[in-house]
Amino acid sequence: MLDSILDALFDSLKILPYLLVTFLLLELIEHKFSKKSQKILSERRKLGPLIGGVIGALPQCGFSAMAANLFSNRVITIGTLIAIFLSTSDEMLPVMLSEGADPSIMLKIIGAKVLIAIILGFIIDFFYAKIAPKQNAKEIVKELCEHDHCGCEKDKILTSAIKHTLKTIAFVLGINLIINLIIFYIGEENLSNLLLGGNIFTYFLASLIGLVPNCAGSIIITELYLSGLITIGTLFAGLLTGSGIGILLLFKSNKNIKQNINILVTIYLVGVIVGLIVDLLF
């Protein structure tokens, strides 16, 4: 149980610098960006899914946490958000490296995830471009402060960013503690056994485990694949949905619950469908 508590603490602290950078960026948008700079930021949104898909592939979940907050404040598009979520692999790469996996296999998996993320991101932005409307910079931070009830509208940039970061970290730590304790009582071995059925429901279960805002899911799925106990399709089903803490922060920071659920369902279905297709093709 002590390990579960410590893991929750470390998982939460890992994203702290990313959250601080995100909130500093939002404060800078309000205080420093000129109208011309805001226009450039809006135009760059068109390339968001491409940039997001590549950035999300880095071996950590910090960028998914950043993406959730940036999307909630309409700085990035929904396609960029989903691209980052889909390309994020949480602990997959460190586990594979520690197990001495074939580098070519790792590159193929990461490359395929990035490609899927970018394609889906652009498709989603094509159909839902209006979900990320242009906003006045003042409105972005005003909504953020109202949502967090932090009373920091008149604070200096760094002070305000720190307030938002600490408030978010406290929330993440609380949820991580609950999740880790649940996994502790269920047992990682029991979770692993659920994935060994070898039928169509395995893809649905793997995608569901991937959605858990915790590194345990990606670790279990990756280790089972390296042991030859699950298929590469099942691996993809779990890793495509494994965006770490990103989904959790999306529900915390974005007030549109229906929109959050739609994003969650989209990511889940992409994981299941891609997993099925990968196994049919390979």
Image (spheres, rainbow, N blue to C red):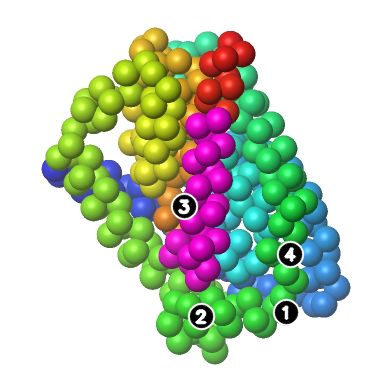
Q: Nearer the viewer, residue 167 or 139?
A: 139
Q: Disc 2 marks which residue?
A: 145
Residue 260: % across, % down: 51, 59
Identify the residue shown where x is 54% and y is 76%: 144
Mark with earlier residue (4, 3): 4
Q: Disc 3 marks which residue?
A: 247
The span shown in magenta is 250-273
Mark with earlier residue (3, 2): 2
**Main secondary structure type of the part rendered in magenta:** helix
Q: CA distance from mark 2 to mark 4?
A: 23 Å
- Secondary structure at badge 2 equals helix
Q: Nearer the viewer, residue 132 or 99?
A: 132
Query: Tag on residue 208?
Result: none
Q: Nearer the viewer, residue 12 or 183?
A: 183
Q: Amino acid at mark 4?
A: Lys
Q: Amino acid at mark 1?
A: Asn
Q: Disc 1 marks which residue?
A: 136
Nearer the observer, disc 1 or disc 3? Answer: 3
The answer to whether any part of residue 101 appears in the image is yes
Position of residue 277 relative to residue 187, above or below, is above
Q: Quadrant of residue 21?
A: bottom right
The crowd level at tag 4 (other Cα within 10 Å; few <14, some 14-19, many 20+) is few
Q: CA distance from mark 3 to mark 2?
A: 20 Å
Q: CA distance from mark 1 to mark 3?
A: 26 Å
Q: Is residue 23 magenta?
A: no
Nearer the observer, disc 4 or disc 3? Answer: 4
Q: Disc 4 marks which residue?
A: 130
